[in-house]
Image (cartoon, grey):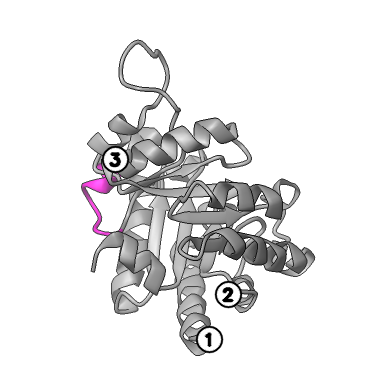
Amino acid sequence: MGMKREIREKPLLVINYKAYASAFGSRGLKIAKAAEEIYRKLGGNVLIVIAPPATELRLISEQVSIPVFAQHADPVDLGANTGYLPLEIIKNTKAAGVILNHSEHKLRLSEIEFNIKKAMELDLITLVCADTPRVAGAVAMLKPDIIAVEPPELIGTGIAVSKAKPEIITDTVKIIRQVNNEVVILTGAGISKAEDVRAAIRLGTTGVLVASAVMKAEDPKRIISEMAEAAVEEYYKKS
């Protein structure tokens, strides 16, 4: 099954490593291998994606079979662009995709469009974050593969948007579907436990984008396992 088809046909759990201490070196690789083990344990019925820092992309991409995404790409071409990260470099690390426009690394709409077009040419999957339903609708018109709705005020709080502001999710789904029936929709911000994953899927999204709940956990493998199992149970119950 091709990757783009797989993300449309399975629940999705995306783990953003951010730049937590646990994201680097052996600790980051251990989390990636745990995620891969859980993916296999669940028979591939949930797609688990990991997004490590740029310095770890090649190492992790070569060590696991689950998809690895970059956390950001700059809207530039190869060449005289000191300190920037073009999509061609991400492709060269063997990563499968990229997160764009996270609230901690925002892009203008024109820059998102630039990256989406180039990613299509490079056969990279795009996951674009949006902080409001209207922004999500605008992004949906650019035809990314995945959109994650993440109100920035809830990121890292442990208060899930699916509980605090469920109307944001339902409004986002409604607006996106008016312009794009293909894009996969995720819930982000404050996702901290299995019930948050269930709630996100019940509200009409395919899965979640999670970070601190995994990366700051004493036992990341347990958290990933609980969330992945919840995603499988709720997604296939709904379908």
Query: Which residue was labeled with disc 3?
Result: 121
Amino acid type indicated by mark 1: Lys
Dot 3 or dot 2, earlier in sequence: 3
Residue closer to the observer: 144 or 190: 144
Left/right placement of residue 31 relative to residue 177 reads left
Callout 2 secondary element: helix
Residue 2 visible at all: yes
Which residue sits at x=44%, y=33%? 114
> Can residue 61 be found in the magenta stretch?
yes
- The alpha-carbon separation of the residues under discs 3 and 1 comes to 34 Å
Give the x, y percent position of residue 194.
Answer: 58, 74
- The alpha-carbon separation of the residues under discs 1 and 2 comes to 8 Å
Disc 3 + disc 1, Cβ < 8 Å: no
Residue 132 visible at all: no
Give the x, y percent position of residue 216.
Answer: 56, 52
Magenta part, dominant SS:
loop
User: In the displayed structure, would residue 105 be above or below residue 226?
Assistant: above
Disc 1 + disc 2, Cβ < 8 Å: yes
Query: Which residue was labeled with disc 1?
Result: 238
Give the x, y percent position of residue 31.
Answer: 39, 55
Dot 1 or dot 2, earlier in sequence: 2
Instruction: Kindly indicate the quadrant of the structure image that contains residue 116.
Output: top left
Query: Which residue was labeled with disc 2?
Result: 201
| Figure quadrant of the N terminus | bottom left
Amino acid type indicated by mark 3: Glu
Residue range (magenta):
59-66
- The alpha-carbon separation of the residues under discs 3 and 2 comes to 31 Å
